[in-house]
Amino acid sequence: MQKYILTTGPSLGNKIKLNEIHQDNFIYRINGAHGTIDDIRKTIINLKNQIDSVEILIDLPGNKIRTANIDQNGVLLCKDKTFSLNINQFNYKDFYKLLKPEMKVYANDSVFLFIVKEINENEIIFLSKSDGILLNNKGMHVRDLHSNIPFLFEKDKQLIQLCNEFNINYVGASFVRKSQDIQEIKKIINPNTKIISKIETLEAVNNLNDILNEVSFILIDRGDLSTEIGIEKIPRFQNYIIQMANHKGIKVFLATQILKNMEEKPIPTIAEIDDLYNISKSGVFGIQLSEETAVGYYIEECVKILNLMQDEINNEKIVL
């Protein structure tokens, strides 16, 4: 039976209680990028109060550069117009030191593209190639930059302490680059907590064999990986990573836009169903739903679709 990672948030765990949809193959994900340590502590307690034997995954935010200290209205973006962000509007205060003019920044999982125009000790001026609104806590990705950033930020270390305190089942290691990153986590985490190494950087793909020697689980985050390698390469890289992991007996989770349409609609697209079928047939151990359950309106319907597809694969017969 496949495992399903369901992300908690305003919808799942709050509006929709766990016992309304719970199955034994569910893992409930807390996205450590959102909320304070105290908020996440309360979420853990809330989930444990709803189901005694709940399996929880705390997903570390990792060294992903994110917007910070932006008010709730966000920053208005106009195509081919410049805008600026102060250096304190990022979760990594030295971000500006890593930038150079004309660098490309892929923001909010590549929804937005910015070009760096000017950098100083007070602000960064970007040229937006997109229209929209840039909100707080959104990723700001520059390719080939992660090797110059520490692997664990302070919030990651605090979340690992929470894992130890509550004996959390799984921890998601974000923006892993090499096997030494996993070893760094192992030094400070309870050995009972299973590490899921997320594969979302090109460096991780290049060091995949060594990383697979350190863990029993990986998760392919197609969103962040696509900003690193280009969205057109995702199918090829996804197949390669799954085949490598299957060969070594490592369990694979797959994430990002599995049932994206069902955030706001009660049915998936045919393309999503086709993708889900091929994913499940490829030897993937589990599926992660993110926004679909964290903020989506059709959580029960999402679970039903996952179950229907699993039944279809288990019982399929060739029709002559």
Image (cartoon, rainbow, N blue to C red):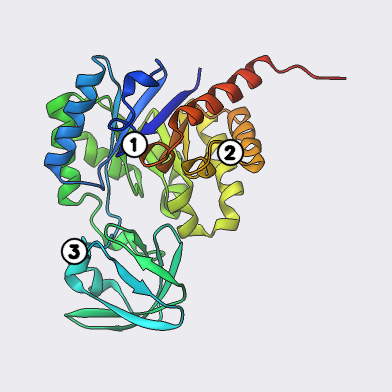
Please tell me whether mark 2 sits on a helix, a strand or a loop. Answer: loop
| Residue 182 image-quadrant placement | top left
Give the residue displayed 63% in from the left and 36% down from the top: 273
Q: Quadrant of the C terminus?
A: top right
Q: Distance between the residues labelled 3 and 1?
A: 24 Å
Q: Which amino acid does label 1 sit on?
A: Ser
x and y percent of residue 1 in the render?
51, 17
Q: How crowded is mark 3: few (under 14 residues within 10 Å), some or many (20 or more)?
A: some
Give the residue displayed 28% in from the left and 63% down from the top: 148
Looking at the image, residue 80 sits to the left or right of residue 70; the answer is: right
Going from N to C along the chain, the mark reached first, 3 or 2, is 3
Q: Mark 2 points at which residue?
A: 268
Task: Give residue 69's mark.
Answer: 3
Q: How crowded is mark 1: few (under 14 residues within 10 Å), some or many (20 or more)?
A: some
Q: How far apart are marks 2 and 1 (CA)?
A: 18 Å
x and y percent of residue 235 in the render?
60, 47
Please tell me whether mark 1 sits on a helix, a strand or a loop. Answer: loop
**Observer able to see residue 188:** no
Q: Residues within 10 Å of mark 2 (few under 14, many from 20)?
A: some
Pair 3/1: label in front: 1
Q: Do the residues labelled 3 and 1 touch (CB within 8 Å)?
A: no
Task: Give residue 11's mark.
Answer: 1
**Observer able to see residue 41:** yes
Going from N to C along the chain, the mark reached first, 3 or 1, is 1
x and y percent of residue 207 in the render?
43, 47
Q: Which amino acid does label 2 sit on?
A: Pro
x and y percent of residue 281 in the render?
63, 28
